[in-house]
Amino acid sequence: MTVVDNEPITFDVDAAEGFLRMFHIAHPEAGPVGPRLAEVREEIAATGTYRHTTHELAYGARIALRDSGWCTSGVPWRRLKVRDLRGFRNAAAVAGECVEHLRLATNGGEIRPLVTVFAPDTPTAPGPCIWNEQLVRYAGYGDGAGDRRYRAFTDSVQGMGWRPPATPGRFDLLPLVVETAHEGAKLFAIPPDVVHEVLLEHPELPWFGRLGLRWHAVPVITNMRLTIGGVTYPAAPFNSWFVGSEIGARSLADENAYGAARPVAEALGLDTSTERSLWRDRAVVELNRAVLHSFDLAEVTITDHHAESLHRLSWLRSRQRHSGNRPAFRLDPAAARRARAGGP
């Protein structure tokens, strides 16, 4: 099945000009904007689009990440590494470089923020797209094992030929699905050796480790579209680092994900027969403590939700009004559905 959007692209010249003026204001060393605008207008008239310079691409990607709200505290966005791989359109090449992105970003636990930009949409061909929500996601099975959020996605990739381990587990790596207009959707295994996982233990509860919980080290967002000056890059994986509560409260505690809050509460001897005992709240606190403790123990970069709250408040205060000319990472509804259901 192919779900790449093949609708003709109507180029927004105003967005291109707005971005280029923004870039030249930020980079006076690039010279006056007039000659660049004339060059871009000619290129758009001839081809229906234009190509960013390496510096324009890097600036646009950094601004998009800074303004997206996904940039966690401590990320030096001005020095964010941008990998320019706009020549990559084939699925296997895109998948291979996604794996390399994960390898570089992991950096032995000292997480390195990265953006990798693949081929853009053009009037003649859409760029490649990635179905997965994040590069590393765990399978969910019909019997309730694994990450329940991805049961439909797991069923879909099994229908496409993916086979889980002979004995399915709770943390089986899902394949990467890369789709191109000329190849359709292709599956690629994520090599386990590039996925740095942290085994979770608690600073005070010795039995916690026996729950067998763990999580991967790097959140690489893979299904958001990067738009810079009217040019759209449908595959532009990026990462910063985890906020502890994303793992403890959302992925592990949530009944629709791993449902780990109940076994933790039962091990703590809490009354789980009624929500008024607040057993769930107490269990989530211990899960979040375990995540932060374990990542710190493993020397893997992570931040906590209190630091992030202060960071987000500062970001909201300084955030500029929305403008269609500003670079942005965006998630369209079709990509959101595809990341969970595995299809159109």
Image: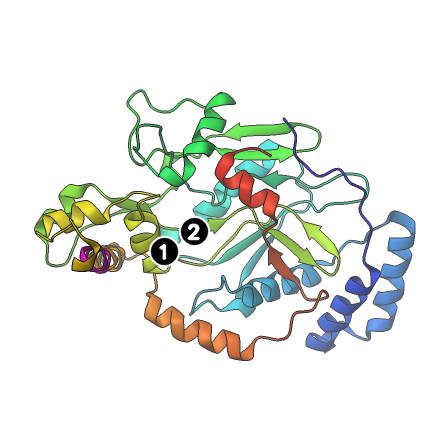
Residue 87 to residue 226: above or below: above
Color style of the picture: rainbow
Check disc 2 and report its element: helix, strand or loop.
loop
Q: Is residue 74 visible?
A: yes
Residue 257, quarter of picture: top left
Q: Could you tell whether 37 is left or right of 2 in the image?
A: right
Does residue 283 show up magenta in the picture?
yes
Q: Residues within 10 Å of mark 1 (few under 14, many from 20)?
A: some
Q: In the image, what residue type sits under mark 1? A: Glu
* Residue shown at the point (82%, 64%) measured from the top left: 14
Residue 343 on image: x %, y %: 56, 33
Q: Quadrant of the C terminus?
A: top right
Between residue 109 and residue 310, name the one nearer to us.
310
Residue 67 on image: x %, y %: 57, 67
Residue 262 to residue 307: above or below: above
Q: Are marks 2 and 1 in contact (CB under 8 Å)?
A: yes
On residue 188, which mark appears? none
Q: What residue does disc 2 label?
A: 219
* Residue shown at the point (72%, 40%) measured from the top left: 126
Q: Earlier in the sequence, mark 2 or mark 1?
A: 2
For the residues marked 2 and 1, what is the alpha-carbon distance in whole angstroms?
A: 10 Å
* Residue shown at the point (14%, 58%) measured from the top left: 203
Q: In the image, what residue type sits under mark 2? A: Pro
Magenta segment: 278-285
Q: Main secondary structure of the magenta part?
A: helix
Residue 327 on image: x %, y %: 66, 63
Check disc 1 and report its element: helix, strand or loop.
helix
Residue 304, quarter of picture: bottom left
Q: What residue does disc 1 label?
A: 246
Residue 264 on image: x %, y %: 17, 49
Between residue 158 and residue 43, name the one nearer to us.
158
